[in-house]
Image: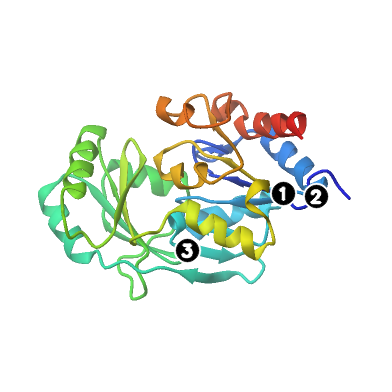
């Protein structure tokens, strides 16, 4: 029996495993070591399958990955979305487009609908090398609003003040806020996928870095954030690693080897 047989490492991508398109080589080496010793690795990201599947394949992760901040589960072996949640957000998005100076993208399974562009949205499209469309006929899983931090702060507060909003508000970055289907978060979906993989809750390791990761950080048996994460997240985890760019996931895996 190998050291990490029956264990699962769940990692966010942006700000945890990668900084834009850069992944520290130490992270790749450490993940490969963990997998060679029997462990499984699951990515749980706000990214769409478009930009998260290549990362999963590069790392040799498990067949499934969590995308769109939990609204989509994608099977890399089958090459398709295997489950997704829907969101009715077109009307509120139209209202926000008129009230706030923000860009808007709808996440629709594997597709992305660019509803309104701005510098923050353009930067996201470029950094993740996304292909976007000008319409979407399928299910909408989430809507992402991008803008200057002060504008996103105001929009975040506004969305949370709407009593009958048909979705949950999550802050995924200083310049992004999102609406997800009610009750959807990385943590709940992580537990579902772990159960499908036959992993018990006490053998789940979690690495994240921002508020959209709280759901899974609360459920992990051993948890970690990079040192450049918000202070309140650092206070709630078991281990604070080096900054993301310096190889935070590799350092966390080293910690797990020492602990187990």
N-term mark: 3 or 1: 1
**Percent position (x, y) of residue 120?**
31, 41
Q: Residues within 10 Å of mark 3 (few under 14, many from 20)?
A: many
- Picture disc at residue 31: none
Q: How is the image coloured?
A: rainbow
Q: Alpha-carbon distance for marks 3 and 1?
A: 23 Å
In this view of the protein, which residue sits in the foreground, 239 or 178? 239
In this view of the protein, which residue sits in the foreground, 64 or 23? 64
Q: What residue do we see at 30% from left, 69% from top?
A: 135
Q: Is residue 80 above or below residue 26?
A: below
- Horizontal side of residue 15 vs 157, given as left or right: right
Q: Are the residues flagged by discs 1 and 2 in contact, CB closer than 8 Å?
A: yes
**Count of marks, rendered view:** 3
Foreground mark, 1 or 2, reads 1
Disc 2 designates what residue? 38
- Picture disc at residue 7: 1
**Percent position (x, y) of residue 218?**
49, 42
- Horizontal side of residue 217 vs 1, given as left or right: left
N-term mark: 3 or 2: 2
Q: Quadrant of residue 106?
A: bottom left
Quarter of the image with the C terminus in it: top right
Q: What residue do we see at 58% from left, 42% from top?
A: 206
Q: Alpha-carbon distance for marks 1 and 2?
A: 8 Å
Q: Is residue 207 above or below residue 46?
A: above
Q: Residues within 10 Å of mark 2 (few under 14, many from 20)?
A: some
Q: What residue do we see at 82% from left, 47% from top?
A: 36
N-term mark: 1 or 2: 1
Foreground mark, 3 or 1, reads 1
Observer able to see residue 154: yes
Disc 3 designates what residue? 72
């Amino acid at each position: 029996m190998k050291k990490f047989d029956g264990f699962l490492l769940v990692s966010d991508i942006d700000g945890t495993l990668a900084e834009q398109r850069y992944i520290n080589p130490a992270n790749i080496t450490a993940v490969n070591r963990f997998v060679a010793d029997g462990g499984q690795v699951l990515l749980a990201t706000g990214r769409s399958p478009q930009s998260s599947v290549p990362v999963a394949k590069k790392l040799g992760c498990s067949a499934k990955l969590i995308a769109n901040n939990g609204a989509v589960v994608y099977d890399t072996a089958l090459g398709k979305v295997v489950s997704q949640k829907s969101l009715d957000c077109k009307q509120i998005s139209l209202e926000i487009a008129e009230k706030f100076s923000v860009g808007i993208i709808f996440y629709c399974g594997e597709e992305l609908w660019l509803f309104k562009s701005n510098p923050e949205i353009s930067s996201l499209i470029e950094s993740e090398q996304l292909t976007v469309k000008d319409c979407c006929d399928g299910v909408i899983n989430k809507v992402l609003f991008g803008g200057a931090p002060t504008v996103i702060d105001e929009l975040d507060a506004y969305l949370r003040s709407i009593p009958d909003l048909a979705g949950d508000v999550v802050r995924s970055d200083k310049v992004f806020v999102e609406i997800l289907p009610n009750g959807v978060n990385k943590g709940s979906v992580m537990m579902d996928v772990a159960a499908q993989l036959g992993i018990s809750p006490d053998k789940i390791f979690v690495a994240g870095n921002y508020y959209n990761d709280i759901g899974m950080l609360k459920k992990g048996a051993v948890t970690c954030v990079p040192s450049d994460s918000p202070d309140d997240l650092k206070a709630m985890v078991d281990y604070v690693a080096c900054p993301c760019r310096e190889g935070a996931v590799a350092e966390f895996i080293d910690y797990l080897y020492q602990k187990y």
